[in-house]
Image: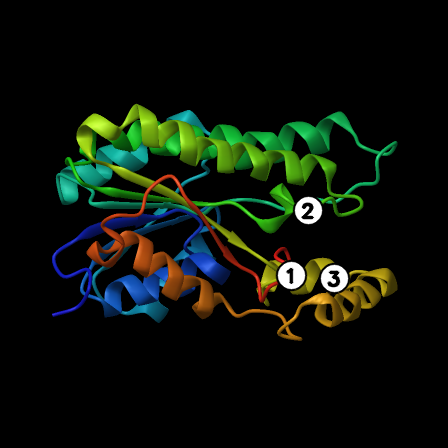
Amino acid sequence: MGKLAGKIALVTGGNSGIGLATAKRFVDEGAYVFITGRRDRELAAAAKEIGRNVIGIQSDVSSLADLDNLFAQIKREKGKLDIVFANAGVAKHASFGGITEELYDSTFDINVKGLLFTVQKALPLLPDGASIVLNASIVGSKGLPSNSVYSATKAAVRSFARTWTTDLKQRRIRVNAISPGSIDTPGLTDLLASSEAGEQRRKMISSAVPLGRFGTPDEIAKAVVFLASDESSYVTGTELFIDGGFAQV
């Protein structure tokens, strides 16, 4: 029996990186998983890679119509959700003084609006005692350059974990946030490889992490399984840093 045996889970942004690694772990631990992504081809490839007990649903979290369709399908297929991992997000960097309205709107639409309405629209499907895990980031606590908009969105996510814990306490629904550090995902690789400055930043980050390396998506996935499972039955409202010590020292 796995830690999530018989559970029904949703992983937004489950087509790559942390989301895909977590969906795999959920299935390995006995859950049936719905994954979402914006691109059908990548979503289908991810579902094929997971291999069993998974349904991929094309969905953009910043679209409320897409979210309505997502939860309508989950209701038809399984009737409930025990676990929500609100993972979908985007990282965009711009120096202060060069921030555009488009960058601000697109980042907040996905990372804040999308996450908020994902969880809110999931509530009718969640039984008492369900688990919600939000993907925040160490940038919500660290003052890294050229990260002001992205960092603000992740600080909002951390705040949601606190306020929703209070809002949902009568239903005993646990809400926790994970805050990954620098994780070796395709998105980060593409971002850093896009310029010479990005490669220099990769080396700088690695040297600044006490454990001396980037983390892996599977290391994040293991932590999400813990927060999703009964092993964390007395944990709610917290922020779990998974960062090799970078934000801690």
Q: Is 214 above or below relative to 168?
A: below
Q: CA distance from mark 1 to mark 3?
A: 18 Å
Residue at 20% of width from left, 45% of height from top? 82
N-terminal label among 2 and 3: 2
Q: Percent position (x, y) of residue 129?
A: 17, 40
Q: Amino acid at mark 2?
A: Lys
- Of 43 and 192, nearer the camera is 192
Q: CA distance from mark 2 to mark 1?
A: 9 Å
> How has the structure been colored for display?
rainbow
- The residue carrying pointer 3 sits among few (fewer than 14), some (14 to 19) or many (20 or more) residues within 10 Å by Cα, namely some
Cβ–Cβ under 8 Å for marks 2 and 1: yes
Rendering quarter of residue 215: bottom right
Rendering quarter of residue 180: bottom right
- Of 133 and 20, nearer the camera is 133
Is 190 displayed left or right of 170 in the figure?
A: right
Q: Percent position (x, y) of residue 170?
A: 19, 26
Label placed on residue 192 = 3
Q: Nearer the viewer, mark 1 or mark 3?
A: 1
Label placed on residue 142 = 2
Furthest-bottom residue in this view: 212
Is 35 displayed left or right of 215 in the figure?
A: left
Cβ–Cβ under 8 Å for marks 1 and 3: no
Rendering quarter of residue 61: top left
N-terminal label among 1 and 3: 3
Residue at 39% of width from left, 61% of height from top? 223
Residue at 86% of width from left, 34% of height from top? 98
Residue where numbered disc 1 is placed: 246
Q: Nearer the viewer, mark 2 or mark 3?
A: 2
